[in-house]
Image (cartoon, rainbow, N blue to C red):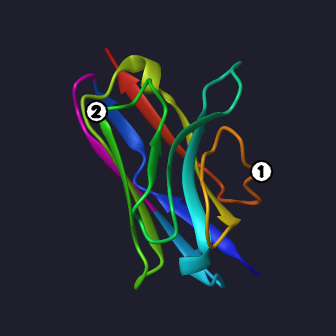
Amino acid sequence: AEQLAESGGGSVQAGGSLRLSCAASEFTYRRYCMAWFRQAPGEEREGVAAISTGGGALYYADSVKGRFTISRDNVTNTLYLQMNSLKPEDTAVFYCAALRRPVGSCSPRTLPYTYWGQGTQVTVSS
């Protein structure tokens, strides 16, 4: 069965950096849109970033543009999220997600991502 496993979360002070990873197994990885979502307590889940199958098309939420970078390695089936200049409002559980979609947009705002990891906590203190 398809599985996604996040790692790399933790606690950091404002202005710091973290790098999240997501290992995909039992996927034909290169045929999947990949995305990062986050959910803070009491808030709705938010699509943070997404990347197309070949890595050529990227999506970022306005709240993270210029600070976060999504990337993927289609050899190791791994998704990354480099997070710089972290703010307390970035505190959330971050989830990796996948959607089988060989071509077209990968926007996490409009598409129903179907596979999810268990999440990893990111805490940013002021």
18 falls in the magenta region: yes
The residue drawn where x is 66% and y is 38% is 109
Label 2: how many Cα within 10 Å (few below 14, some 14–19, many 20+): few
The residue drawn where x is 43% and y is 30% is 123
Residue picked out by circle 2? 66
Say whether residue 3 is left or right of residue 37: right
In front: 17, or 110?
Answer: 110
The amino acid marked with disc number 2 is Gly
Whether the residues at callouts 1 and 2 have beta carbons within 8 Å, the answer is no
Q: For residue 76, which quarter of the picture?
A: bottom left
In front: 84, or 62?
Answer: 62
Residue picked out by circle 1? 112
In front: 57, or 12?
Answer: 57
96 falls in the magenta region: no
Q: In the image, which residues are magenta?
A: 14-21
In front: 12, or 19?
Answer: 19
Residue 93 spot, x, y in % from top left = 57, 38
Label 1: how many Cα within 10 Å (few below 14, some 14–19, many 20+): few
* Secondary structure beneath label 2: loop
Against 70, is 49 above or below?
above
Against 36, is 99 above or below?
below
Q: Earlier in the sequence, mark 1 or mark 2?
A: 2
Q: For residue 24, which quarter of the picture?
A: bottom right
Residue 54 spot, x, y in % from top left = 45, 71
The amino acid marked with disc number 1 is Pro
Residue 60 spot, x, y in % from top left = 45, 38
Against 68, is 3 above or below?
below
Q: Quadrant of the C terminus?
A: top left
